[in-house]
Amino acid sequence: MRKVLPEDLDFNESQPYFVLYLMTNRFQVGDDLDINLFMIWTGQKHREFREVLGMTERDVKLKMRHDDYVTRFIGWLKTFVPTIEPEEKQLTLFLEGE
């Protein structure tokens, strides 16, 4: 187990699947991180995505370019990232400034 580092949440510094795992599960810098859970999550998401595509793992390998699969998979993973609601106080200050 290790702690989440600032670069772990940066798409320029870390693998996109990893960043999206952290964002989807609302990890913050300093949180404890079990890499095994990330690996399990990634495997589950690949299976779910293949189901969405209506393809088996073999179909994906035979019928899709790897880069196309990765691009589509990352786009699909982004749909799981929760939106961050602005705090009510921040929203009030924004509206007052109009």
Image (tube, rainbow, N blue to C red):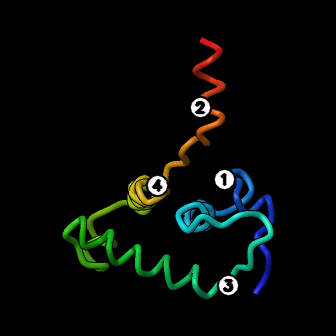
Residue ID for mark 4: 78
Could you tell me which quadrant the C terminus lies in?
top right
In this view of the protein, which residue sits in the foreground, 24 or 60? 24
Amino acid residing under circle 1: Phe
Residue 91: x %, y % from top left: 59, 31
Confirm or deny contact between disc 1 and disc 4 (CB under 8 A). no
* CA gap, disc 1 and disc 3: 19 Å
Residue 22: x %, y % from top left: 61, 66
98 over 39 or under it: above or below? above
* CA gap, disc 4 and disc 2: 25 Å
Residue ID for mark 2: 91
* CA gap, disc 1 and disc 4: 12 Å
Using residue 12 as the reference point, say whether residue 74 is left or right of it.
left
Residue ID for mark 1: 11
Using residue 6 as the reference point, say whether residue 27 is left or right of it.
left
Q: Secondary structure at mark 2?
A: helix
* CA gap, disc 2 and disc 3: 35 Å
Categorize mark 3 by other alpha carbons within 10 Å: few (<14), some (14-19), many (20+): few
- Mark earlier in primary sequence (2, 3): 3
Which residue is found at the position 58% from the left and 85% from the top? Answer: 37
98 over 29 or under it: above or below? above
- Mark earlier in primary sequence (1, 3): 1
